[in-house]
Image (cartoon, rainbow, N blue to C red):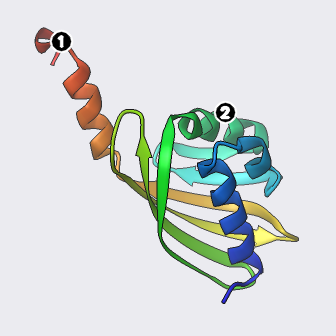
Amino acid sequence: MTTKALDTALAYHRAWTAHDFERAMTHVAEDVVCDAPAGRIEGAAAFRDFMGPFTRLVTGSTLIAAFGDDRTALLMYDTRTVPVDHAPGSECVTVHDGLITHIRIVFDRAPFDAARQAALAPGQR
């Protein structure tokens, strides 16, 4: 069963994980607010600058679970990226008039930290 918010969240997720970030952004409101581990991001342009580079690193994604109602949806997924094989994350989105107005992103930074550490020369660690 799908609902309005879940449909929007899934369309957004399918687009960015398929390397079509422009299509993904058609599901995002101009005044979107994103709360992510890096802090609060406000507005579509700032969100594009934050999320766009990550989507270019994605080599695949597995949707683990998706739930929602007419206003809110929650997706949990595991992405494969250039630097790490498993990057679990989740997004809780609020949708108004068919657009994502708020998105809270939670992801495990540990795999990325470990990959950065491993890439350092032994004397830099």
Q: Nearer the viewer, mark 2 or mark 1?
A: 1
* Residue 108 % position (x, y): 35, 52
Look at 66% across and 90% down and name the residue there: 1
- Looking at the rendered structure, the secondary structure element under dot 1 is loop
* Residue 79 % position (x, y): 44, 52
Q: Earlier in the sequence, mark 2 or mark 1?
A: 2
Q: Nearer the viewer, residue 9 or 96?
A: 9
Relative to 20, 89 lies left or right = left
Q: Is residue 118 above or below residue 67?
A: above
Residue that carries the numbered disc 2 in the rendered image: 49
* Residue 93 % position (x, y): 64, 67
Residue sticking out furthest to the right: 97
- Looking at the rendered structure, the secondary structure element under dot 2 is helix
Q: Is residue 89 above or below residue 98?
A: above
Looking at the rendered image, the quarter that the C terminus falls into is top left
Crowd around label 1: few <14 · some 14–19 · many ≥20 (10 Å) = few
Q: Nearer the viewer, residue 49 or 20?
A: 20
Q: Is residue 89 above or below residue 49?
A: below
* Marking on residue 121: 1
Amino acid at the residue labelled 2: Asp
CA–CA distance between discs 2 and 1? 29 Å
* Marking on residue 32: none
